[in-house]
Image: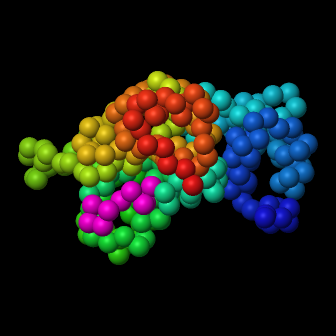
């Protein structure tokens, strides 16, 4: 567990990322509680919260801050890396169990798919295609035979590309028809209508990855359930698995069963 002394030594950028993650998990928190937890002054916390509010990461209140529930703006990757970390590692291990040796796998952007990449360290001969710019550094070189990154515009906040799920044999040439055995798709929200995310470009890429996959597993920690974001990715019936960290509400579990979606939990 991090001590107050270690928090004092942390660079401000790291503290603000930790602060955003703390507010996200607490839901609502006071300035005094945050100052005590992070071992800094109330004025410092107020300045950090003001900046995070301007960035759309938290909602500033008179005496503290609220989780930015339902915000359409993406949180920065360094914030999300500190959120639900244990849950994401559990999901990563479960999802890795769906990957056969020598399989062709697509993974989208997100911190949960980074957890999957780390969990694939004992796999061999995989072909990986992704728009997640962090995966080449996270996945073990011994796990894959070929690794491809989809081109497109780079979104710095998510460290991912947004563009077509496609490759060409030569520059300007025709697209290669690509298919995969399994698409592992991390989403921002899950409800009985399906799966959604905050960015239209991301949603389009996720949907196309699903279309090109023999099987699809949706990756979502329990904080994502019962929510809906801006752009729908797909409906329940279109996927094969939902991989999460704890049992969902009975109504949603029933909806998954009716859609013939297998629920995987630790």
- Magenta stretch? 95-103
In depth, the one of 10 and 144 nearer the eye is 144
Residue 53, how many percent across, how many down? 70, 33
Residue drawn at (60%, 42%), measured in percent from left and top? 247
Residue drawn at x 11%, y 53% is 169
The residue located at (52%, 30%) in the rendering is 254
Q: Dividing the picture into quarters, in which one does residue 252 lie?
A: top right
Does the magenta stretch mainly form a helix, a strand or a loop? loop
Query: Residue 152: image x %, image y %?
Result: 30, 44
Q: Position of residue 156 (x, y in %)?
A: 47, 46
33 horizontally vs 121: left or right: right
Res. 192 visible in picture = yes
Q: Quadrant of residue 31?
A: top right
* 222 lies above or below 229: below
Task: Tell me, yes or no, whether the highlighted magenta stretch contains residue 229.
Answer: no
Q: Report the label total.
A: 0
- Residue 96 in magenta? yes
Q: Where residue 148 sits: x, y (%)?
A: 27, 58
In the foreground, 187 or 242: 242
Q: Residue at x 79, y 63 (%)?
A: 2
| Left or right of 229 in this view: 170 | left
């Amino acid at each position: 567990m991090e001590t107050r002394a270690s928090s004092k030594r942390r660079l401000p950028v790291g503290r603000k990322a930790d602060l955003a993650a703390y507010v996200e998990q607490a839901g609502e928190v006071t300035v005094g509680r945050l100052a005590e937890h992070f071992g800094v002054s109330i004025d410092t916390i107020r300045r950090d919260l003001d900046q995070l509010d301007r960035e759309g990461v938290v909602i500033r209140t008179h005496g503290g801050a609220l989780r930015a529930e339902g915000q359409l703006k993406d949180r920065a990757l360094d914030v999300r890396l500190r959120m639900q970390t244990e849950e994401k590692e559990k999901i990563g291990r479960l999802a890795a169990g769906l990957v056969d040796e020598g399989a062709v796998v697509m993974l989208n952007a997100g911190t949960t798919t980074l957890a999957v990449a780390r969990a694939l360290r004992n796999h061999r001969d995989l072909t990986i295609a992704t728009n997640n710019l962090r995966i080449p550094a996270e996945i073990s070189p011994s796990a894959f035979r070929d690794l491809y990154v989809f081109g497109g515009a780079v979104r710095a906040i998510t460290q991912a590309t947004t563009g077509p799920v496609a490759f060409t044999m030569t520059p300007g040439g025709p697209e290669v028809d690509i298919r995969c055995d399994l698409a592992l798709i991390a989403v921002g929200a899950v409800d009985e209508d399906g799966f959604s995310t905050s960015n239209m470009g991301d949603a389009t890429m996720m949907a196309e990855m699903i279309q090109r996959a023999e099987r699809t597993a949706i990756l979502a920690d329990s904080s994502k359930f019962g929510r809906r974001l801006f752009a729908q990715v797909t409906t329940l019936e279109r996927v094969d698995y939902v991989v999460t960290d704890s049992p969902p509400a009975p109504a949603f579990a029933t909806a998954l069963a009716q859609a013939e979606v297998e629920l995987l939990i630790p």
